[in-house]
Amino acid sequence: MAQLTLERLVALMEECGDRDPFATQDLAGDIEDVSFDELGFDSLSLFNTCARIESDYPVRLSLDDVLAADTPRGLLALVNAGLAQAA
């Protein structure tokens, strides 16, 4: 299975998350190390995105690990480590 890319993660976040309409961070920019809060995604949006990831990819994500990820880079590392174990 292919790894989850930043581009795909952003697309899933936009599809599944309810982004704060007042968020000013451009999702097309360099966002790997920007917190989900700063990107305008609260924990519910993040959980919805992770549910979709679990639906699309053979990986299971614990809530504690997802909350600890805090940034797209952290979530990508978590998901891709799970995908590597599943292979």
Image (cartoon, grey):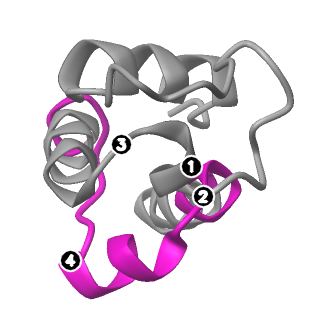
In three-dimensional space, the C-alpha distance between marks 1 and 2, rounded to whole angstroms, equals: 5 Å
In three-dimensional space, the C-alpha distance between marks 4 and 2, rounded to whole angstroms, equals: 17 Å
Specify which label sits upstream in the sequence, 4 or 1.
1
Where are the magenta residues, as a range? 54-76
Drawn side of residue 28 relative to residue 15, left or right: right
Frontmost of labels 4 and 3 is: 3
Residue assigned mark 1: 38
Query: In which quadrant of the rendered view does residue 49 lie?
Result: top left
Drawn side of residue 80 relative to residue 79, left or right: right
Residue 41 in the image: state x and y as whole percent. 36, 42
In three-dimensional space, the C-alpha distance between marks 4 and 3, rounded to whole angstroms, equals: 16 Å
In three-dimensional space, the C-alpha distance between marks 3 and 2, rounded to whole angstroms, equals: 9 Å
Q: Nearer the viewer, residue 9 or 36?
A: 36
- Residue 35 is tagged as 2
Q: Please, which residue is most extreme toward the front here?
A: 22
Residue 19 versus residue 81 in the image, above or below: above
Residue assigned mark 4: 63
